[in-house]
Image: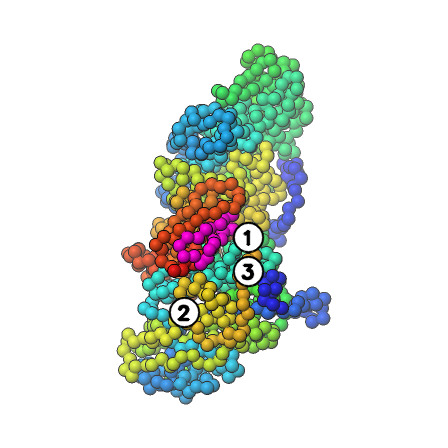
Amino acid sequence: MDRRNFFSAYKKPTLKKQRFVPTDPVARTQTGLTPYAGKWTENEVIHLLKRTMFGSRKADIDYFKTRTMAQAVNELLNPVAALPLPPVKEYDTTGALTQPDTNIAAGTTWVSDPNNDGTIQSRRRASFKKWWMGNMINQDRSIREKMTLFWHNHFSTETNDVRNALFVYRHHAMLRANALGNFKSLVRAITIDPAMLVYLNGQLNTANAPDENYGRELQELFCCGKGAASLYTEGDVKEAAKVLTGWRNNATTVTSYFDSNRHSTVNKQFSAFYNNTIITGKTGATAGDVELDALLTMIFNAPEVAKYICRRLYLWFVYYDIDATVETNVIEPLAVILNANNFEVKPVLNALLKSEHFYDVLNQGCQIKSPVDLVVGMCREFNVAFQPDTDYITNYGFYNYLVTVVNNMQQNIGDPPDVSGWKAYYQAPQFYEVWINSDTLPKRNQFTDLMCVSGFTFSGKKIIIDGAEFVKSLSAPGDPNTLINDLVNLMFRLPLSDASKLQLKKDILLSGQANDNYWTGAWQQFITNPASMANTLTVKNRVRDLLKYLMNLAEYQLA
Amino acid sequence: MKRRQFLKNTLPAGVVLPGIINGYSIKAFGADSPFVQALMLPTTLTDHVLVLVQLNGGNDGLNMVVPIEYYSAYNNARTNIAIPQNKALAIPGTNKIALHPSMTGLQEMFKNGKAAVIQSVGYPSPSFSHFRATDIWMSASDSAQVVNSGWTGRYLNYEYPNFPNGYPNATMKDPLAIQIGSVTSLALQGPAVSMGMSISNPSNFYNLINGVQDAAPNTPAGKELSYIRLVSQQTQQYSAVVKDAAARVTAQVTYPTGNSLADQLKIVARLIKGGLSTRVYMVSFGGFDTHAVQANSNDTTTGTHAVLLQRVSDAIKAFQDDLKYLNVEDRVVGMTFSEFGRRIKSNASGGTDHGAAAPMFVFGKPVISGVVGATPIIPTASTVNDNIPFQYDFRSVYATLLENWLCVKREDLQNIMLKNFQTLPLVNAGACLTVNPNQSGNNLISNYPNPFTQKTTITFVTAGGHTLIQVIDALGRVLTNLIDKDYAAGSYTVTFNSGALPSGVYYARLQNLSTQQVRTMLKVR
């Protein structure tokens, strides 16, 4: 596909205040899926980690440096950690309640306890978001959390619309459990998922009054996309809606079920895009499942489906500029792999993450961090210390703060703007640049400033970046040149000039002195005699100022 | 115009300007061009500005201000670097001291009545560590005390208590303080936030002032980097006002070249004239850590230290001339300081090691020109550990400038200085009109009564959600968390009972998600 056609097929972009147009054409790559055989150094490890996890922790970098590239990707794609335990009751239950939350004890999970009280539902939805934030911060060494967020963006739902917190949790747990599973199976599960049946009105879709909402998004957003080669018709939307009639929810069992009385039993005729398929109308208890399977078989036979989901993955893991070369060299071969593996996602990620294309220098550092990437990545990379699990109330308080922070930066986890997900992943021509504007960039800087300087206090405990403690883990923190080099290498994907580094050293670490020994001496004293309050503060404040400064540079926003 | 009206019509925070100053290009336009007409200044607003000139490294005060009164002892103590008596530059009205021969510019300023020297400024139990001594000078703490806020930060927190909530605003649209350097110093740190800009992205100002910035590569990463930098420049809270102020000034006197202090002061003059109501500017100039070969052995009036002092002197002289040329001379007072002086006795490598008290210069048209204090006594046979004892506490200089130049009420000085210090004859006190703190911005936390003796009631405004009120002492230690829970949006009160705490300055800090504000509370007996 021609890139221009591809992009013009998307929604017309909303007007942007400031469009940055580079003066020179930006270099793009010709590489494809040939397995990467180049050097495997800290740089490549960091690239892989920043794209597949939230931030690249020093410990993870060191760990994967001792593996090969292939081993690293294999480990990331095959999580061994158990799925996280469900969220617990940490909210207070005071207030005028129609159904007091007395079935479960504080600290035990609420996910199996139906409760229709609006206040309780609201607190549980908030509890879910806090818990999710905690899962991302405490993620295992795998791609699972990033894929869970990917699917949340792809099959976008909003907790405020779903309302039932148990539905919200089940939906989310299903995404996580299948994050590295089969795309087609996931679409099937999503189609009759209680939360999705609420969100896109599937539960209201009946033979007498078909509701086309889900039938449309199933094709437009979840499977086929809006690319030039996605030629499903309005008729296909209507027919798909009929196929999907009859599904309902049971709030007590937290499951969906098929009600054959509501099902449209007529034959469903599809367009040439689907080879003029006819799905024969069925009756009885199995009609819903049978017709759904037929529908998905038909949709997934359309070649555009595999390409579409591969483009979505590419946008998530590599870059947003899918030009004709990328389409030919990367997207199409990935689609072949997806088809050949019957829509298993893992082989596609395996090929992409081990490819020359993925490690191409032109594809490094070109992602603008999403708010979640920035906030969670910062907490993880700087080993921000939370409380032990037993103090879940305080931890949920911290997570709640971080949920608020990412929300203020325009990424409200659990509540994307609409069914299309976040604009950064579809809005041409800005894409990731949507995250950065005159409102959100200052908020990013204020957040990193706060975490460097005063931290966030809740319940008498604090989350804060302990910069001096962090830099102890670097190769030679007593040498101001090495310290700055190490930090720049860990934090930035683009180099800083020697002149800039020299200036930083002089202005911050040396307080204007010319002699490196002043820093070295202060550092050594900090290590040998941390009880010397004045010197310890000297060191801590300078590391703090250095980190704060680096995080305020534009480079820090890139991954 | 009255000062209060002035404040009403004008504006706040420390902007960080770049450390590398390469000069800048302002296009030349004819005075009659429409562009220049459009840039014509409104009536110049009068307000007092303080310029802090930091000499990093520990400046050798004895060779800067030569103790002619004890010349032979001086010469004996440092034969290898001593300034010949007949070469030192006379200061009008005194024959007890003289200036380093390279400081002709400063000598001229003394002659014009625009400079003063304060002898032997220091503090008890001096620190000989660059870092620690610098922190002491910046925070205005006692030697044994670690204070985590800066003296100008506390001053600005007093003057603009609501900052940064609701700033910039119609009455204070400018930065409160501007530091030229890549990071705001401890001096500008307020009790909770830096009174410098909360968004300190100096790269914004590289383009603004001198066009120096690491280049963005021609790659996708470079494209995104450039995009973020662009937004950063456009959204930088104060970039527009600073840029506009700089652009309004199209002619200045000639400054010396190859002199980074001159480059920095040139920007300061320009921003002052350009209409910023910023109260404090801070510039710095390094290289004073002269442990070896600070003077040429064949001619001690030349060499490393001579070059440094000449640059300081030339830069300040050009700055003063420029202020006069720009017609803002009445508004500006400057001050030099260094973290310590150097040892009386020179070492064998032709340098001097870390020392104690040293002279400070205060300069500007409003200063009381002359010499404050006695010439430091030099022992007839100095030993390696001999130091100049302090005659004046450096905090007396600060307190004097705060009261007599920045017009802080005497009864409020302790809030800022944490203790009481003597007033020195540096500036004509008549220059000051009484000031009240600028109450613009959003006042989120207050207390009554203040000062208090035992209990005080803290009123705070939360936007809803988790809200924290903590009481912090002047050393930055959290004494108590009075409030630490979720609130619905609104205004609430809580009582702070100070119990057995000693009298002095305490801070009540509000944290409401990413918002914070600090209230200074004074406990008195």
* Type of the residue with mark 3: Asn
Q: Which mark is residue B126?
A: none
- Nearer to the camera, A142 or B249: B249
Residue underneath mark 1:
B442
Where residue A306 appears, as percent x and y from the top left, is: 56, 30
* Type of the residue with mark 1: Asn
Callout 2 environment at 10 Å: few (<14), some (14 to 19), or many (20+)? some
Q: Which mark is residue B421?
A: 2
From the viewer's perspective, tell me whether residue B242 is left or right of residue B137. right
Q: Secondary structure at mark 2?
A: loop
Quadrant of the snapshot with the N terminus of chain A: top right
- Nearer to the camera, B223 or A531: A531
From the viewer's perspective, tell me whether residue A492 is left or right of residue B382. right
Give the Cα distance between marks 1 and 2. Answer: 32 Å
Please check the rendered image and state whether residue B458 is part of the magenta-colored stretch, yes or no: yes
Q: Which mark is residue B438?
A: 3
- Nearer to the camera, A237 or B249: B249
Identity of the residue drawn at 36% across and 82% down: B82
